[in-house]
Amino acid sequence: MDVRGKRVAVLGGGDTAMDVLRIAIRRGAAAALCIYRRDEASLPADAEEYEDAREEGAQFMFLSRPLAVLGNAAGEVTQVCCIRMEAGEPDPTGRRSVKPVAGSEFDVPADVVFVAYGFTVPRLPDSDDFAKLSLDGRGCLQVDANRMTNFPGVFASGSIVRGPAFLSDVVRTRAKPPTPLMATSKPAGRDPLFLPTRQINTTSRPAGFRKCSFRPEGRPDYTKCRWAHPSLPPAARCHPAPSLRTVDTVPGRHALGAAVEHQR
């Protein structure tokens, strides 16, 4: 979708919303606005993604809930109708709920609207043994401390138990298998392999560079500084017998060429 010169509104406050905001900016949007119904402290997106989006020019409107997307007679989006929200009582998880403020409706101009509300837990079939599994109020499977469901021998983990979560959290849960599951799945004489986790620290490039790095017309032409890897002669590349043809380039890489490619 071409968003150049258009006002982009993104509904939602998760990592997907941050991705949409940042890509819209890279694609030349005139403005990229995130509309989120809770306050800034409740934003579910990764803190670094949020800060990077702000640094790159994304705007945020908190405590605002979209009600409708409005358009003109030509079928084009013109604005998003929203209502102001205010903080309410905390829910069972400690997260503060929000409620609408009566009579506070307002319109936000927009040309393109993206919905980034995340996902809901898929419904399990209500037949056979699936119907015996207990669910909580969110529709997630209920498990005990060993991640066993109420159905003996059936274990569950990940988003179907936690609800929407970061991939790293899901992997961390998988890295600590429940004791009963290990007892039933451990091969004789062998221990199951679980990869250790470690923190990887990375450095972020300046916002000016990030904003243009996605757009071909705004980034340097890296192809001009690529090392020319030597090719095999045409006769060797185009052997009449396909089974005897292996590669089109000279095996190996020149040390200088490797250094040049590394700097790219």
Image (cartoon, rainbow, N blue to C red):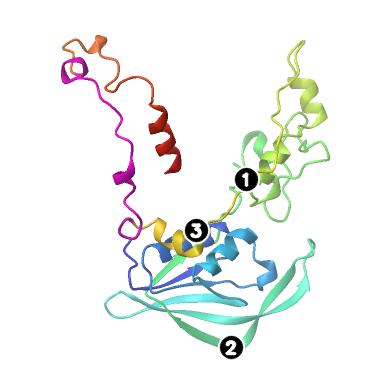
SS at mark 2? strand
Q: Secondary structure at mark 3?
A: helix
Relative image position of residue 56 (x, y in whole percent): 50, 67
- The tag earlier along the polypeptide, 1 or 3, is 3
Residue drawn where x is 29% and y is 45% of the image: 224
Quadrant of the rendered image containing residue 192:
top right
**Which residue bears the numbered disc 2?**
104
Percent of width and height locating residue 245? 25, 14
Q: Which residues are magenta?
A: 216-237
Q: Is residue 224 magenta?
A: yes
* 155 relative to 14 in the view: left or right: right
In the rendered structure, which amino acid carries the disc numbered 3? Asp
**Residue located at (72% from left, 71% from top):** 97
Give yes or no for contact between labels 1 and 2 (Cβ–Cβ under 8 Å): no
Please name the residue that numbered disc 1 is placed on: 167
Quadrant where the image shows the C terminus: top left
